[in-house]
Amino acid sequence: MRNMKRIKWIILGLLSLSLALAACAPSVPPTPSEAEIAQQVAETQQAKATQNSVETLVALVTQLSNQPTWTPQPACPVCPTQVVVVPTATPNATEAAAQPTAAAPTDAPGAKCFQFDFLGDVNFPPGTVVKPGTKFDKTWTVKNTGTCKWTTDYDLILAGGEAFGTNKRGDITREVPPGDTIDLTIPNMTAPMTEGTYYSYWMIVAPDGARIGYGPGQQWGLGIQLVVSND
């Protein structure tokens, strides 16, 4: 009887010891699946990439902060001042308007030899009113300001505008030495029959065909501004 009780207590002791050991033993985590392993690998790689990006950005900011400071410089340290030349002489209203373009260039051979100044209208000044068909002679006063003498081989020639019934040419009737003044006339002109304002421009032409006017660039012609009206 005593042996049975002893065996019973031994069995109970062994059971208690087994339970105690089971409670103290470490738990074994379950084995992850393939999908869980792939997700963990992907998260690890993403974390490494993020860390690399941050490290690269920090290095770039550090490099830029060590660059020298740049100060803007003016594009033109000493900019030249543009000089505008304003002509001091202004022609009258007739000569300034619609001047012809058939003048000799200023750099043409003999340009300094062959030039003149306009001194004024002898008759029929700009704006003169005449009846339709009126006959008239137009005269200007000019001065030979060149270094060459004009001969009777020089002429006046229509450079633009109304011919007023002429053959578009007029004669220089005498020699004109440098510095001399002469009245140049286009004779036998006829006013148009239609009312209106008419313009005509004349230049001097040399025997070689070179044309010359007066003013800046010697491009202004001797002008006529005639108002034809029955009033």
Image: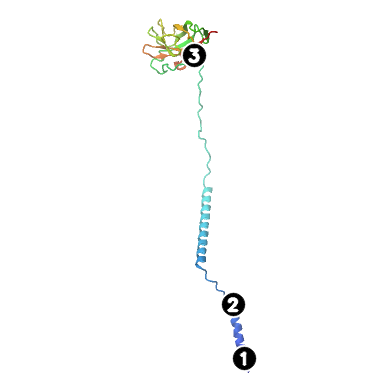
Which one is nearer the viewer's eye here, 109 or 213?
213
Which one is nearer the viewer's eye here, 161 or 179?
161
In the depicted structure, whether residue 41 falls above or below residue 27: above
Residue at 63% across / 94% down in the picture? 2
Q: Identify the coloring.
A: rainbow
Mark with earlier residue (1, 2): 1
Q: How many marks?
A: 3
Name the front one of labels 3 and 2.
3
Q: Which residue is mark 3?
A: 95
Residue 13: image x %, image y %?
61, 85
Disc 1 crowd, CA 10 A, few/some/many (<14, 14-19, 20+): few
Q: Are marks 1 and 2 in contact (CB under 8 Å)?
A: no
In the depicted structure, whether residue 49 falls above or below residue 139: below
Q: Amino acid at mark 3?
A: Glu
Mark with earlier residue (1, 3): 1
Q: Amino acid at mark 2?
A: Cys
Q: Which residue is mark 1?
A: 6
Mark with earlier residue (3, 2): 2
